[in-house]
Image: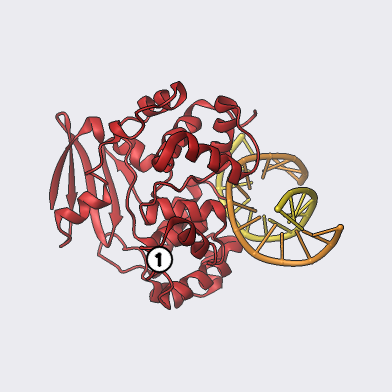
Chain colours: A red, B orange, C yellow
Amino acid sequence: MQLRVAETCFDPAVIFGCGQAFRFQENEGTWEGVAYGEKVTVRADGGDVVIGTSGPLPEKQWRAYFDLDRDYTLLFPHADAVLLEAQAFGRGLRILRQDPFETLISFIISANNHIGRIRGIVERLCVLAGEDKGSWFAFPQPDALCRVTEQQLRDIGIGYRAPYIAASARRAADGELEYLADMPWEDLRKELMRFEGVGPKVADCIALFGFGRTEAFPVDVWVRRIMKQLYHVDGGAASIAGYARRMFGAHAGIAQQYLFHYARHHLTRGS
DNA sequence: GGACAGGTGCGGT
DNA sequence: ACCGCACCTGTC
């Protein structure tokens, strides 16, 4: 499958670099990654970006994966100066609609962890338990991940999250992710937090990136920093998220991604 | 070599 | 309901 998009609304460096997905890397001007068991390549061509995929999934599914039918310029008609600047800086960002199981496991790994290390662990996890596609590996299926021991998980650098991954994979294999898609947002969040290793922040990431729930507003240290430094909002994660939903509306989670990306490039750890 | 970054779970209050 | 601590690994 091949798909062409204007690069003004699709910037792979932002999309794949802002911490929502961990399997894409740039290689001599082409972004390569794996999603839904297919190899995906993204490269600039004139004023466009060309997306190529390796398997049977139809264009419709990839349009959904890349969220291509949403106009990101219309999301925040009453944006304040901070969000406007973050949006300009992150032009071409899109929220990927990723596989719920892959999102669950990847973001349990992300807890108390750094993007670079998360990438390495996820890649080794795919080699350990994912389907071998020749020169690359798919993300493991739940039952395959269940056959991996906690020691094997520790050996690839997962650390103390090993029992969380094992338990959550077990529950996913037992079908516990199946009935979440149509739940109201608060219920989905509560259900996700029942998985081991999933707290408020990780639940919001899974809801946003794995279930397309743009109400979810994950509060991590970078979002905390930007909310404090640029909005003068401080306090617990819940009150920050509540403030964000009142200010940014139903798509606060997309605002969060713009702000997160902006914060990581413009703010320091200090203040 | 020691401090630190990064969320969650747990035991204490 | 909230607080303080332990958890694992990579980097400086």
Between A66 and C2, which is closer to the camera in this rendering?
C2
Question: Where does the image place residue A156, in percent across and percent down from the top left?
Answer: 50, 62
Identify the residue at image location x=43%, y=27%.
Answer: A83
Looking at the picture, which amino acid does disc 1 mark? Leu
Question: Where does the image place residue A239, in percent across and percent down from the top left?
Answer: 60, 42
State the image quarter where residue B4 is shown.
top right
Using residue A142 as the reference point, say whether residue A2 is left or right of it. Answer: left
- Kindly identify which residue carries mark 1: A180
Question: Where does the image place residue A123, in percent across and percent down from the top left?
Answer: 40, 57
- Tally of marks: 1
Please give the chain letter of the residue carrying mark 1: A
Between A74 and A61, which is closer to the camera in this rendering?
A74
Q: Visible in this render: residue A93?
A: yes
Identify the residue at image location x=48%, y=34%.
Answer: A247
- Please tell me whether mark 1 sits on a helix, a strand or a loop: loop
Identify the residue at image location x=41%, y=34%.
Answer: A258
Identify the residue at image location x=30%, y=51%.
Answer: A33
Using residue A163 as the reference point, say whether residue A67 is left or right of it. Answer: left
State the image quarter where residue A86 is shown.
top left
Q: Which quarter of the rendering shows the C terminus of chain A? A: top right
Between A73 and A197, which is closer to the camera in this rendering?
A73
Work out whether A265 lies above or below A55: above
